[in-house]
Image: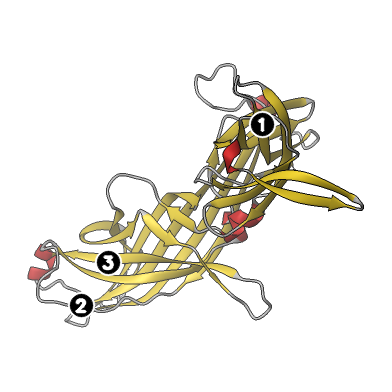
């Protein structure tokens, strides 16, 4: 008999019990298999496998009573480590013709094989495992993969009225200022609600930098005001039953591929603190950092996934508008826009 229990962290606790018989060791494994059904087509793919070998000496003996019958049992408790490959998939939809249905599901199973000294299997048991609760309680991290430690975007002079000359100015890039977002966007925190259900929050640090040369010419801003950031969360899901016959990679066959795409929009109004210090800390630029406090939408609740049968991917688009006030009292409107691929991991 297999019993499994979920605990916060990286472990799946299992209790295995069996009647005494001749075995030398037990091999227990946790397997994750992806099943995809589109019309008459069916496909499966194993995306996770973790295993342990337990010697018979690790088993303890206990007595089990059922009515008047008392039997001897051997039992053992095992902790299986869960890594970043654990995911959750439950998708459904229709093909572009709106008539061919399909669904895709990721199922986990726990299997135990009792083997003798020669390696032969003398008994085997298995049971399904639901890891959805573990994923909900696990720590979720959002990354923006790429080279270097941050994504840097030069500011663009916004199209708008100049407060001094009362005329419209065209879009133009400037090397004087830039916006930086780290590739490790942050760890998702769950905040309780009065109703008892929690919601997930993410604080993304955003840094406004001014080169040292620009500051030396008296161009260090006095303040950054009227900040607004339009946030777009993009979710893309796709699944099928096989790769394209003309593809050398993992591109799914369009004849059995179902795609879904959603977007959730948010608006944030953070505040940048003043630029402090006589010299920039890294001797190259002055910086001012604020945090973009966002509520993670329900569509970003599952880890990223990419296999030959299914894909779950995310993107984050940030478009910021703000005014920069100089020491002379002049104001200039600016815009910054970046679109980042997001990797969602759980641990």
Mark 1 vs mark 3, foreground winner is 1
Q: Residue at the left extreme?
A: 216
Mark 2 vs mark 3, foreground winner is 3
Q: Residue at the top extreme?
A: 246
For the point 35% across and 60% down, which residue is it?
336
How crowded pointer 1 is (Cα within 10 Å; few <14, some 14-19, many 20+) is rated as some
For the point 61% across and 71% down, which residue is it?
198
Which corner quadrant holds the N terminus? Answer: top right
For the point 47% across and 71% down, which residue is it?
268
Q: Position of residue 157 (x, y in %)?
A: 30, 62
Q: Secondary structure at mark 3?
A: strand
Q: Position of residue 107 (x, y in %)?
A: 69, 40
User: Marks 1 and 2, Cα distance to the nearest angstrom?
Assistant: 73 Å
Left-right relation of 342 to 29: left
Q: Which residue is mark 1?
A: 113
User: Marks 1 and 3, Cα distance to the nearest angstrom?
Assistant: 58 Å
Q: Nearer the viewer, residue 344 or 286?
A: 344
Query: Would you place residue 266 above or below residue 56 in this image?
Result: below
Q: Determine which of the numbered discs, if any, sits on residue 326 in the image.
A: 2
Query: Would you place residue 335 above or below residue 37 in this image?
Result: below
Task: Say which label, 1 or 3, has the lower sequence index.
Answer: 1
Q: Determine which of the numbered discs, if any, sits on residue 208 in the image.
A: 3
Task: Say which label, 2 or 3, has the lower sequence index.
Answer: 3
User: Dividing the picture into quarters, in which one does residue 80 lie?
Assistant: top right
Left-right relation of 307 to 269: right
Q: Position of residue 132 (x, y in %)?
A: 65, 53
User: Dividing the picture into quarters, in which one does residue 59 lie?
Assistant: top right
Q: Secondary structure at mark 1?
A: strand
Q: Position of residue 190 (x, y in %)?
A: 54, 68
């Amino acid at each position: 008999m297999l019993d499994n229990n979920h605990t916060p962290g990286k472990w799946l606790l299992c209790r295995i019990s069996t009647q005494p018989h001749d075995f030398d060791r037990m091999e227990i494994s946790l397997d994750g298999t992806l099943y995809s059904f589109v019309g008459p087509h069916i496909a499966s793919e194993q995306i996770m496998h973790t295993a342990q070998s337990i010697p018979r000496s690790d088993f303890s003996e206990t007595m089990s009573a059922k009515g008047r019958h008392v039997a001897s049992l051997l039992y053992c408790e095992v902790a299986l480590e869960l890594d970043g490959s654990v995911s959750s998939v439950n998708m459904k939809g229709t093909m572009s013709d709106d008539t061919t249905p399909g669904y895709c599901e990721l199922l986990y199973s726990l299997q135990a094989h009792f083997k003798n000294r020669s390696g032969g299997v003398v008994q085997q048991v298995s049971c399904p495992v639901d890891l959805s609760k573990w994923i909900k309680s696990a720590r979720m991290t959002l990354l923006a993969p790429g080279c270097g430690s941050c994504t840097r975007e030069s500011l663009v002079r916004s199209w708008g009225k100049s407060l001094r000359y009362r005329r419209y100015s065209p879009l133009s890039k400037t090397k004087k200022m830039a916006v930086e977002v780290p590739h490790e966007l942050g760890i998702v925190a769950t905040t309780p609600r009065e109703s008892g259900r929690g919601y997930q929050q993410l604080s993304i640090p955003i840094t406004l930098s001014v080169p040292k040369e620009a500051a030396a010419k008296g161009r260090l801003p006095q303040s950054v005001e009227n900040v607004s950031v339009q946030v777009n969360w993009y979710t893309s899901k796709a699944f099928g039953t096989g790769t394209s016959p003309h593809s050398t990679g993992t591109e799914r066959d369009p004849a059995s591929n179902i795609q879904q795409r959603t977007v959730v929009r948010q608006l944030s109004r953070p505040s940048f603190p003043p630029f402090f210090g006589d010299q920039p800390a890294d001797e190259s630029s002055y910086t001012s950092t604020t945090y973009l406090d966002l509520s993670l939408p329900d569509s970003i609740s599952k880890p990223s996934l990419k296999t030959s049968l299914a894909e779950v991917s995310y993107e984050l688009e940030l478009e910021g508008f703000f005014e920069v006030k100089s020491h002379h009292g002049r104001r200039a409107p600016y815009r910054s826009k970046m679109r980042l691929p997001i990797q969602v991991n759980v641990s």
